[in-house]
Image (cartoon, rainbow, N blue to C red):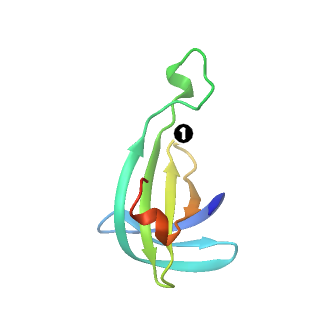
Amino acid sequence: MFISEPIEVEKDPVKNEPSKFIWREEQKRITRILSSWQDWGFPSGVSRANWRQRRHRNYYRVECDDGSICEIYYDRKSVAKQEWFLYRIVEKSDIAGNK
């Protein structure tokens, strides 16, 4: 299920990885990071790619304490303000497929 909404993230100070997040006033504790990857691509529909348009995102597929599997990402476009998003809640059928 596609969400793409801002979230508040707390990171583990030792591992420097997300450990919990708040979405729509509900706290979800991350029990396991299943995978992570970076996206440095360009938005779709860009006719002339310019380095300023490039995405700089760190994605995490995480398992939460309520059993849900979510994909969250840190958008590194702003150094001054950390911006995290809940990208989607992964359906069980999506786990065997692509990211």
**Residue sitting farthest toward the top:** 48
Left or right of 61? Residue 87 is right
Left or right of 68? Residue 96 is left
Residue 41 sits above or below residue 83 on the image: above
Q: Residues within 10 Å of mark 1 (few under 14, many from 20)?
A: some
Image coordinates for residue 24, horizontal then vertical, percent = 70, 72
What residue is rendered at 50% in x and 54% in y?
73
Image coordinates for residue 88, horizontal then vertical, percent = 57, 61
Image coordinates for residue 41, horizontal then vertical, percent = 47, 33
Q: Quadrant of the N terminus?
A: bottom right
Foreground residue, 3 or 51?
A: 3
| Residue position marked by numbered label 1 in the rendering | 77
Image coordinates for residue 12, horizontal then vertical, percent = 37, 70
**Residue sitting farthest toward the right:** 24
Type of the residue with mark 1: Lys
Residue 42 sits above or below residue 60 on the image: above
Q: Quadrant of the C terminus?
A: bottom left
Q: Secondary structure at mark 1?
A: loop
Q: Examine the image and state in which quarter residue 63 appears.
A: bottom left
What residue is rendered at 29% in x and 69% in y?
14
Foreground residue, 10 or 3?
A: 3
